[in-house]
Image (cartoon, rainbow, N blue to C red):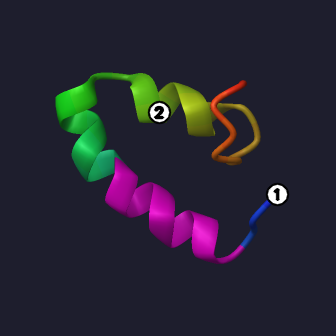
Amino acid sequence: MALMGPEVALRDEWNDSALEDGLVVWYQTRGDGVIDGAA
């Protein structure tokens, strides 16, 4: 799932939660900006 548009907005919201989860979300989206969990 390679989301180009909505994903950006999602990542912005996820980053808020990432502050609590540490670098979990950051790591997930670090690869290709794709929320996959398998970077």
Q: Tell which of 38 and 32 is nearer to you.
A: 38
Q: Main secondary structure of the magenta part?
A: helix
Considering every residue shown, the one lying at the far right of the view is 2
Q: Which mark is residue 2?
A: 1
Q: Is residue 33 left or right of residue 24?
A: right
Q: Kindly report the distance in space between the C-alpha atoms of the residues bearing marks 2 and 1.
A: 16 Å
Residue type, numbered disc 2: Trp
Highlighted magenta segment, given as a residue range: 5-14
Q: Is residue 17 left or right of residue 5?
A: left
Q: Is residue 22 left or right of residue 28?
A: left
Helix, strand or loop at label 1? It is loop
Residue type, numbered disc 1: Ala
Q: Quadrant of the C terminus?
A: top right
Locate residue 5: give its quadrant.
bottom right
Give the residue at mark 2.
26
- The mark nearer the N terminus, 2 or 1, is 1
Q: Can residue 12 be found in the magenta stretch?
A: yes
Q: Quadrant of the N terminus?
A: bottom right
